[in-house]
Image: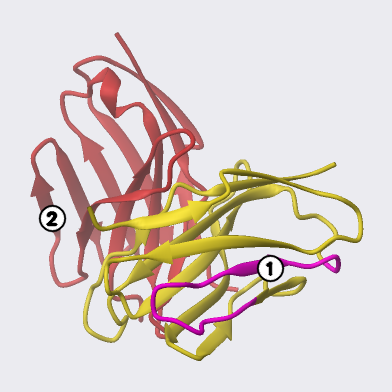
Amino acid sequence: QQQVKQSPQSLIVQKGGISIINCAYENTAFDYFPWYQQFPGKGPALLIAIRPDVSEKKEGRFTISFNKSAKQFSLHIMDSQPGDSATYFCASRGSNYQLIWGAGTKLIIKP
Amino acid sequence: DGGITQSPKYLFRKEGQNVTLSCEQNLNHDAMYWYRQDPGQGLRLIYYSQIVNDFQKGDIAEGYSVSREKKESFPLTVTSAQKNPTAFYLCASSMEARRGNQPQHFGDGTRLSIL
């Protein structure tokens, strides 16, 4: 089964630092790459997304970097805040329009 | 406010029992999805429906059943055939998937445990 591999599994960052989460996908036919943010006891919510014809997308403190040749994409959170503490999931959309999800990264921002 | 409502928030199942998880949306979305979330794993697709009265199996459909009789509702039944049902179940909806990059909107989940 096609997979999306996400790393690291957990991450601790000091307040004000940069948080970086990485994902790698297998199928070059994947055409949409969203990142979701999930707080405990809640459902995931779309944070930011990118298409493969763009190398970078920025929304506020959140940036997706996309490397099509390496089949990798990453989420950067600048000036990380305690409120950013959550679990982050990357995903990729396949040819049947369904999302394939990474295993998640638990991010803790230390005050 | 538009959104997705899942109920109940917590559910307990006895051996040999079928239980049904409710999912209702008022976003006028065509597509609905059920996912299972286990600790340390990503979301795994159980079933999805692109239109009323039609649904398809996802990656882990065994031991589960669904119906889509109304656009707003997509209940999931966890049958006694599902031997390891303890998990966090998430329902989502989106505009029709073929209409471009439509984000999935999620409910707040139902946590199912075995008694």
* Picture quadrant of residue B62: bottom right
Q: How far across and down, in percent of the image, does residue A36 sit?
A: 34, 50
Residue at the limit of the structure toward the bottom, as seen here? B53
In the rendered structure, find residue B77 and report the number of the disc placed on it.
1
Element type at mark 1: strand
Residue appearing at x 28%, y 30% in the figure: A19
Camera-nearest residue between B97 and B78: B78
Residue appearing at x 44%, y 88% in the figure: B52
Left or right of residue B23, residue B14 in this image = right
Is B5 included in the stretch rendered in magenta? no
Predominant SS of the magenta segment? loop
Q: From which residue to which does the magenta span run?
A: B66-81
Q: Tell me what hue chain A is rendered in.
A: red
Is B73 included in the stretch rendered in magenta? yes
* Picture quadrant of residue A82: top left
Residue bearing the label numbered 2: A56
Residue appearing at x 27%, y 76% in the figure: B95
Q: Amino acid type of disc 2?
A: Glu
